[in-house]
Image: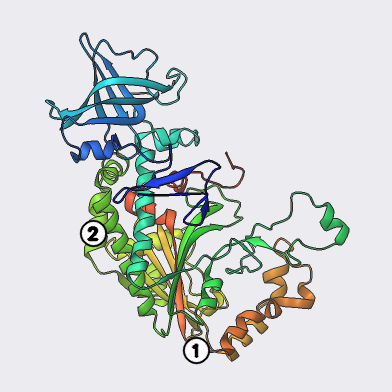
Amino acid sequence: MWSRSGRLLGLTLPPGVSVILRRGESLCLPNSCRSDSRLKVVEALSGAAVEEQEVQIQGWVRAVRVQKEITFLNINDGSSLQSLQIVARPDLDIRGITFGSAVEIWGKLVQSPHKKQSIELLADKIRLVGACNSVDLPFKIKERHSLEYIRQFPHLRCKTNVFSSLLRIRSEASAAFHSFFKDNGFVHIHTPIITSNDCEGAGELFQIEPASKTAEKQNNAHFFDVPSFLTVSGQLHLEVMMGAFTEVYTFGPTFRAENSQTRRHLAEFYMVEAELAFTESLKDIMEVMENLFKSATSFILSKSPDDVELFHKYVAPGQKERVEQMLKNSFQVLSYTEAIDVLQRSMETFKYEPKWGCDLQTEHENYLVEYCGNIPVFVVNYPYDIKPFYARDNQDGPQHTVAAVDLLVPGIGELCGGSLREERLDLLQSRLKHMDVKHTFCSTLDLFKNCGRHGLKDTYQWYEELRQFGSVPHGGFGLGFERYLQCILGVENIKDVIPFPRFSHSCLL
């Protein structure tokens, strides 16, 4: 036996606290460790606990059924779609316990005689932790509320079955992406949220300024000495890492100041982005994109079958078969030129006329996916003039293209966008030099007041320098996380797959 006061593993302990451990014992400071008897609902339902074992369950009441002899409570703690049935004797005090109440329950797990559940808890003690005014609660026990309805209550919608399922799926999806990249040797890079770059060159940026501009007005200077913005992409920072790592990725929030309230757009959303070094073929990028999609989707289906089934059964009937179709078939490939030809030969009436040299609209993307049998399709080699400056010049003709690729999926349209990056310094410099700097960077939101003096080429001098110190051919892509969730679950509105949606004229909470 040994004891030690004051410090433990480099951490300062509170005054007067000492730790005593015997051989084989685990470290547990007072009030810091979970009781051995405390179970999550998912653990109780799995049957992992020993029958007749005394356990403690904490959660929220999803249903109350009062009968003559006993009362049944359904308790859920967010760990599972299914709730645990509690059997309460008439001598237990359940006054004030209603739908939505937070409770702690002690009792024994036993086999249930009912077909709908295999395990139930015979309660010995019930404690009301947090009362709930079920009359004023906007969600009712026996009603199935639509996603549109619960969207009105961002502070409460996690209490519903459908949104708690979404959040568990979202958590598993996040783990699936990280697992894929880790298993395939990618290094996770934390790219900055605050940046001085506009990766897309579209000017749809949120500019960052101190809440109090007094100091800035006095000094006539920016907080960071240069205009700074919320990031629209981590790509350029990942490209920095191509000087020392062969495969990297990032996963985090990105921001677009698009004045749009459509079901497709958010001002804040999450992006999965990856870069690969030593690649000169779009096929390498496309292979990672397809494998990532299929691996992550299979992971989610295996880890959250009940939650996914809720969406496939009640939100988007038929989506299960569509997802299975995407998983079992190889993704199709069309060149941009072929895609335009398909669109122009179709009998469909489009709002936007498909023409070579114009970007594909959502209606075009959805038609192309249907044309390919509702299987995801890669569209490759886009016109030179409609893609960002970093896309690799194919140096072809007469129709000048770049090595760029978009992945189009059923019901969504564009899910991923990527390209080979221009590693040839002379071509990159020529592209930056000939871009209309004033139009690209000055006229939109007046972002760069010194544009006339410093221009796009000077802004990206560091980007050019990357090509001078051991640069290699490389490429990468970005995947919209919320659009991915929409794709596999069949959710129509992107605002229903993110915990706290931000869009123009709406920033609740």
Which quadrant of the figure has residue 385?
Answer: bottom right
Q: From the image, which quarter does the C terminus lie in? A: top right
- SS for callout 1: loop
What residue is at 36 percent from the left and 39 percent from the top? Answer: 34
* In the foreground, 197 or 258: 197
Looking at the picture, which amino acid does disc 2 mark? Gln
Residue 128 or 35: which is nearer the viewer?
Answer: 35
The residue carrying mark 1 is 395
Residue type pointed to by label 1: Gln
> Could you say which quadrant of the image residue 415 lies in?
bottom left
Is 363 left, or right, of 293 in this rendering? right
Quickly name the residue at label 2: 325
Asked if residue 187 can be seen in this view, the reply is yes
From the viewer's perspective, is residue 417 above or below residue 262?
A: below
**Is residue 242 placed above or below 168 in the rendered structure?**
below
Can I make out residue 117 in this image?
Answer: no
Extreme-top residue of the structure: 68
Q: Residue furthest front?
A: 1
- Nearest to N terminus: mark 1 or mark 2: 2
Q: Residues within 10 Å of mark 2 (few under 14, many from 20)?
A: some
